[in-house]
Image: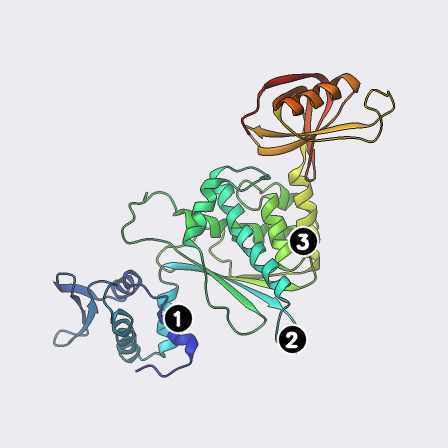
Amino acid sequence: MIRSGNNILENIDRVRLFDLKNYLYRKGWKQYATNGKKWQIFKLDVDSDQSLELILPGSESFIDFRERIQQSIEALSQIEDKPVSEILSGLMVENADSVKLRLQVPDSVSSLPIDDASKHIKAIRNLFLYSGCSEIKSFPHFEQPLPAAQEYLGDFKFCHTFRGSFGFEVSSPIINEQEDRDLFELPVNRRIVERIARGLVALDSAVRNDDPDILISSYERALNARMCDALAQIGLGGELNFGVDIDWATILEPSEDVVSFRSVTVGEAQVSMLSYASEKLKIVEPTAQQISGRVVNLHCVANPSEGSARRTVAIKVDHSDHGLIEVRLALGPDSYLRALKAHSEGRELVASGQLQRKGNTWSLDAITSVQEGQQSNK
């Protein structure tokens, strides 16, 4: 019976029956007998006269499933003459990519402020979330996460934090047993992790060559603006250095451009590069467009009819390319009164001009027309 520390026992809970069977197949074992859903026997031919047998549960629904898996791992440890921890490590990366993030804090620090911890976790979540967004649409920036990308997060799990430098681990299975997947396309979980790895490679190259365009120009296959922001925020905007390590699932070889990626450190220089790239990726050059949306803010510090008064309006626009955005307009007296009337009557405001984004701010400039629109249903 395993008598090692709790971390080994906890890791056994991460081993699925599907992963253990794949591990056995890869090691030369063959399934040769089953008893319905009760048990299945695997056999390994040692030589012409000797073979070994391993009995696995038929499903994960049995009460003693974990105990049976533990016994199988102990048997494999003896058969392969390897420590249980090494067998477990092999099983955990059999069918799951593992991304480990280590905050580099002094050895004397034994705790993190709870507010900081929540920021780290939120940033890590956003890194995977917006990587998923770019797997759906390769935009340089996303105002809001795409709903479909939210669904991808269901397969990504925060594992037990590990000792040393405050580590966080995110694991995701590559292949599910009942999944009917396209054999000619990488699973989306793997593509999300590869995009992160590819972005870190581009970031490292951009810093070493002092060339931010290496990072900026690679957004279609690497980091979008939100991913840049998330990476910077994992280290609280440069306050803490952190390392990123990736253990690739052995069941599926990574793409050629990231197969050699193992680890990278993100520090002050990297955060500076990420911040610059993010700002550039958020820029949308002015284009002539007509927009319509609900008025959500009106501001005028003086009489709106006075020529010198500064009149600004913000409308919420559901844009076909950029999603739900808030656009600011600087209006003349008549147009401002139309906006005020539209707001009071619950109507949309329709405006034409040059739509652009700088940083996180959208604006409509060189406005040529402002009209009341249809009744707003929001």
Residue type at mark 1 is Asn
Is 311 placed above or below 217 here?
above
Q: Nearer the viewer, residue 7 or 202?
A: 7
Residue drawn at point x = 53 percent, y = 42 percent: 145
Q: Name the residue under label 1.
A: 11
Q: Where is residue 62 in the image (x, y as percent from the top left)?
A: 23, 67
Identify the mark nearer the N-term, 3 or 2: 2
Q: In which quarter of the image is the N terminus?
A: bottom left
Q: Mark 3 points at which residue?
A: 207
Q: Which of 138 and 26 is in front in this view?
A: 138
Q: Distance between the residues labelled 1 and 2?
A: 26 Å
Q: Is residue 68 left or right of residue 307?
A: left
| Residue 228 is at least partly visible in this image | yes
Residue type at mark 2 is Val
The label number, if any, that marks residue 370 in the structure image = none
Is 225 placed above or below 87 here?
above
Q: Name the residue under label 2.
A: 109
Q: How far apart are marks 3 and 2 (CA)?
A: 29 Å
